[in-house]
Image: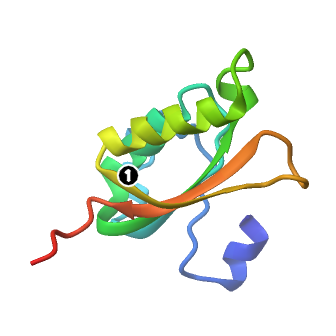
Amino acid sequence: LINVAKSRTNIIPIIEDARHPLKYRMLVGMVDTVFADVAQPDQARIVALNAHNFLRNGGHFVISIKANCIDSTVAPEAVFAREIKKLQAEQFKPAEQITLEPFERDHAIVVGTYRPEKKK
């Protein structure tokens, strides 16, 4: 990530605990897109917390959901559905979900919009 950010000035790598966005709040302004690959049981909460602090209304999100990191006792599809519901409760509007099979087992990527603008 750091090497990519060297050549792309619109990427800001944050090497910090994503569960505590107030620690890096002064370093980052509002952004257009949040990419999250945190592999934590509460990753939907972590993404929502960071979106509330940094993602502009109508901005986009990309989240990698690793089912086994959240709950290895239920089917991955059930974990994905539950995480998407959590995101929706935080004003995320998922547009697409893609599983990463056969490259990564029990992983999915979800993309969408945060606090989408109301259509007139």
Q: Quadrant of residue 119?
A: bottom left
Asked if residue 87 shows in the view, the reply is yes
Between 5 and 83, the residue placed more toward the observer is: 83
Between 81 and 19, the residue placed more toward the observer is: 81
Circle 1: residue type: Ala
User: Could you say where residue 100 lies in the image, as x and y percent from the top left?
Assistant: 79, 54
* Residue at image coords 35%, 65%: 29
56 left or right, relative to 34 = left
* Residue at image coords 90%, 53%: 102
Asked if residue 20 shows in the view, the reply is no
Q: Which residue is mark 1?
A: 51
- Quadrant where the C terminus sits is bottom left
Between 61 and 19, the residue placed more toward the observer is: 61
User: Could you say where residue 115 lies in the image, as x and y percent from the top left?
Assistant: 26, 59
Mark 1: few/some/many CA within 10 Å (<14, 14-19, 20+) = many
- Quadrant where the N terminus sits is bottom right
Q: Quadrant of residue 73?
A: top right
> Furthest-left residue in view?
120
